[in-house]
Amino acid sequence: MKRDILSILDLTEGELRDLLDEADRLKRMRKSAIPHLLLPGKTLAMIFEKSSTRTRISFEVGMAELGGSALFLNAQDMQIGRGEEIRDTARVASRYVSGVMIRAYRHDTITEFSRYSSVPVINGLSDLEHPCQILADIMTIREHFPRLEEVRLGWAGDGNNVCNSLILSTVLTGMEITVATPRGFEPPAKVIEMAKKRGGKVTLVRDPESAVRDAHVVATDTWVSMGTEKEREKRLEAFRGFTIDKRLMRMASPDAIFMHCLPAHRGQEVTDEVIEGPESVVFDEAENRLHAQKALLVSLMKDAE
């Protein structure tokens, strides 16, 4: 039966645990140079409305290492970029490929595509969520703190798509998250409500100090995401004082790690000293995109008709 992953909550707690276990296994196999051609003959279409580094490389390499292939498709070079309806593109693509990953500006684009696609659809990023990033984040956190239900995560920055998915993930992991944003940049109320309704542990605060105090994980993201460039000056002013620096890291737990999904803007959301420091796991986090997504691809495409 066809399965889509558009939100981190499209997984159950058990499915998330199984995916992370499989990602760990695939990571060990790769490091030991053990072939794992689990998707021979499978093809993944990768549709990009937004530019990408980690998403494109990790999915493309992942499919190759699993014995399949990946097609890079720039939306502007497709008929969808000239006005072809999403539902038509979805139905046509489904006749050619085994699965589709979409990196889109609007979450509705991915939702509509999945509605008409007969093959699995993966949200590679939207304005609402970034579930693939969160799979890698949880995998990285688990490598340092195996008991996820005991983890406190402090987010200081924009209440964006990554923040949204982290908030929703607390439903599955038992982690506690405290989010600090300037007024007007909070995560959507519907995301907070959904997480709390399903048992997620979420607290909203205004100052970054309250968010990171005693946290095991300190996380942030760019203040100016793709699509918000016109607000750049307004955002830089609003987020003044939210830079993750050594002072804030000292307020966290002594064994705290620093996470950032990248790309990072040193001197804005994080200092060079922190991102290059011993508490930073950002490049492990980036690497784990590959392993987590390979596990996801196998789970969705291995036995799909």
Image (cartoon, rainbow, N blue to C red):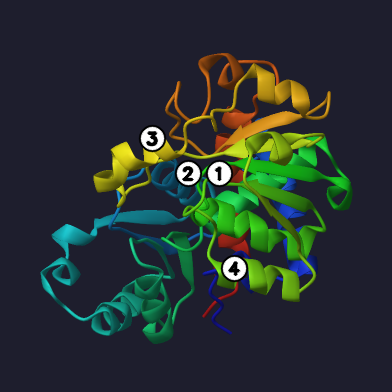
Q: Amino acid at mark 2?
A: Ser
The kind of secondary structure element at disc 2 is helix
Q: Residues within 10 Å of mark 4 (few under 14, many from 20)?
A: some
| Residue with the mark numbered 1 | 290
Q: Give the spatial CA distance, label 3 vs label 1.
A: 32 Å
| Residue with the mark numbered 2 | 58
The kind of secondary structure element at disc 3 is helix
Q: Earlier in the sequence, mark 3 or mark 4?
A: 4
Q: Amino acid at mark 4?
A: Val
Q: Earlier in the sequence, mark 4 or mark 2?
A: 2
Q: Earlier in the sequence, mark 4 or mark 1?
A: 4
Disc on res. 191: 4
The nearer-to-camera label among 2 and 3 is 3
Q: Is residue 203 left or right of residue 284?
A: right
Whether residue 79 appears in this view of the structure is yes
- Badges 2 and 1: C-beta atoms under 8 Å apart? yes
The kind of secondary structure element at disc 4 is helix
Q: Earlier in the sequence, mark 3 or mark 1?
A: 3
From the top left corner, tell me how far across and down residue 36 is, in percent: 62, 48
**Residue at (82, 29) in percent of width and height:** 253
Q: How many marks?
A: 4
Compare residues 245 and 164 and report the one nearer the observer.
245
- Badges 3 and 4: C-beta atoms under 8 Å apart? no
From the top left corner, tell me how far across and down residue 261 is, in percent: 53, 39
**Residue at (71, 49) in percent of width and height:** 178
| Residue with the mark numbered 3 | 236
